[in-house]
Every structure is written in structure tokens, then in C-alpha cells.
Amino acid sequence: MKFDNILLEKRAGFAQITINRPKKLNALNKETILELHEAFKSLNDDQEVRAIILTGSGDKAFVAGADISEFADFSSEQGGELARKGQEILFNFVENMSKPVIAAINGYALGGGLELAMACHFRLASTNAKMGLPEVSLGVIPGYGGTQRLPLLVGKGRAMELIATASMIGADDAKAYGLVNHVTAPEELIAATEKIISRIMRNSPMAISAAIRAVNDVYREDKNGFETEITEFGNCFGTEEFIEGTTAFLEKRKANF
Ligand code: COA
């Protein structure tokens, strides 16, 4: 598939998706959301890809939010549908990917941009990153999961303050809040993310997928995460990767996954 709004690059064992509308600070319009869905779907099925970096093009923004020009005249029904469809095809889809998706936040991550970064499995930020959910300043609330994922990551009080004040925080505060795991200089952001990926790639992709499913069930009321863990743990036994991992340990060599 040809993409007009994103760049998809495959490297040795992993992929990078770059949202590429720098003149609009990579704002998420409908087409970009559809293209991201297609790209993530194809990478989810691609056995050669074991982790994904998501970033924004240019040096100013990861994503400055949903594209405000597209929904300014929406009705209540259209607004609800926009949020429902977006959550389903992109935000929840990313969260439930079978391999780690890592947000490399290289500038503004606002509204839908921060929501997209929060749907990723974890986040790094460059020192110039600015994060926030400014929707209430537009007379609306976050609609792509922001009211749910932000409190889980930073706690209810901090989330309430960030949302109600529509304010932005910088990378160091985001790290102190637990919103991002690491802060780097802008020119080192992708290399730092790749370094983490090289460590992920030493491990069993099958076990990582199972761990993602188990961790995600912490947050689902319709699932018991402990039960998921028991099932997923049991399912690992007897698989080729389990045999390779345990045999390699016993033979005092590195596992080859
Ligand atoms: N939707 C649509 N277009 C957006 C956008 C968004 N969320 N964010 C930025 N843009 C566009 C601007 O309209 C501008 O386009 P133009 O050059 O055609 O006028 C371009 O991107 C550059 O943005 P600009 O505002 O000129 O940059 P800035 O450096 O002065 O300010 C921001 C940067 C991020 C503070 C500012 O763009 C902003 O507040 N954006 C909206 C953030 C937001 O509310 N997001 C939540 C949406 S639900």
C-alpha cells in the first residue's frame, strides 16, 4: 500500500512509522488514521518485525492532536462516531499489537497525539517534547482514550489537573510523572529507542506477545488478568521458543529466537 501521510521503513528486525505531515505538525486527519491502521495491521502480521518505533517527522512535533479543521462543524453523533472509530481502528489496535510499539516523542504530543503515544506500550521523549491534553480549551474532552489512559499512567490527581488546566508539561516532568520512561537529546531519540529494541530482540517474540496480552488485561474489567497470566504462562510450555530458551540456559549459551 502506498501512503501519503506516513513513512514506513523496515530495518533489521524492526520497523519505524513516521507520521509525515510536518506542515500541520503531524495532526491526525482521517486519512492519516486510516493509513496508520493499515501500516500497523501489516506490521502486526509481519513475522520479521519484532518491534515498532512510532514518531513524527520534523523537529517540532510528534503529533499536535486530531486535525481540528476536520471536526469543527460535527454534530454530536458525528463526534461520537469519530471517537468510537478512531479508538477501534487505531488507539486500541496499537495497544493490542502483538509486538512492542514504542512512541519516540520528538516534540509536541498534544490531544490525540498524546493519546496515541499513550496507546503505545511505552514512551521515550526528547528534551524538547511538550505533552498535554488541551481539549477542554476547545470545548470538548479527549476522545481517543485520553481520559482513561492518562490516569492509569500518571494517577488520577495529576491527570485531572493536566486535563482541566489544558496545560502542557515538558519531558522531565513527564518522566517524573511516569508518562515517559526515558528522556534524551533530540538527536539521540531514535538511537536510544533502537537500543531498547535491540534488547527486546534478544527475547522470545512469542513470550513478549503473551506478556503484552497479560499486562493489558490489568486494565480490562471484563477480564481477570491473573487468569490471563495463568493461561498465557501455560501456553508458553512446549512451544519451540520455550524449548529453545530453556535449553539455551541449561547449555549456557544465548537463546536464538
Ligand atoms: N489540527 C489541525 N491543524 C493543526 C493542529 C491540529 N491539532 N495543530 C497545528 N496545526 C496546524 C496549524 O493550524 C498551522 O497550520 P497553518 O500553517 O496552515 O496555519 C500549522 O499546523 C502550524 O501550527 P502553528 O499553530 O502555526 O504552530 P505554533 O508553533 O505557533 O503552535 C501549537 C504550535 C502545537 C501550540 C499549536 O499548533 C496548537 O495549539 N495546536 C493545536 C493543539 C491542540 O489543541 N490539539 C488538540 C486537538 S483535539
Image (cartoon, rainbow, N blue to C red):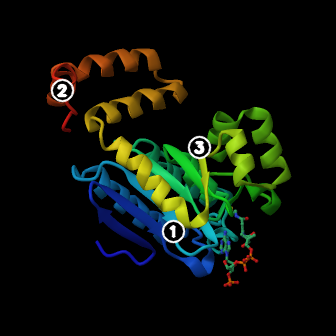
Look at mark 2 in the image and give the residue it sits on. Answer: 248
Residue at the spot 72% in from the left edge and 41% down from the top edge: 176
Q: Is residue 131 left or right of residue 254?
A: right
Q: Position of residue 175 (x, y in %)?
A: 67, 44
Quadrant for ligand 1 reads bottom right
Q: Is residue 137 above or below residue 216?
A: below
Label whose residue precedes the other's in the sequence (3 or 1): 1
Residue at the spot 62% in from the left edge and 72% down from the top edge: 70
Q: Quadrant of the C terminus?
A: top left
Disc 3 marks which amino acid? Answer: Asn
Label whose residue precedes the other's in the sequence (3 or 2): 3
Disc 1: CA contacts within 10 A as few (<14), some (14-19) or many (>=20): some
Distance from Cα at disc 3 to Cα at disc 1: 29 Å
Q: Position of residue 13 (x, y in %)?
A: 27, 54
Look at mark 3 in the image and give the residue it sits on. Answer: 181
Q: Position of residue 98 (x, y in %)?
A: 34, 42
Helix, strand or loop at mark 3: loop
Distance from Cα at disc 3 to Cα at disc 2: 31 Å
Distance from Cα at disc 1 to Cα at disc 2: 47 Å
Look at mark 1 in the image and give the residue it sits on. Answer: 30
Q: Are marks 1 and 2 in contact (CB under 8 Å)?
A: no
Q: Nearer the viewer, residue 62 or 204?
A: 204
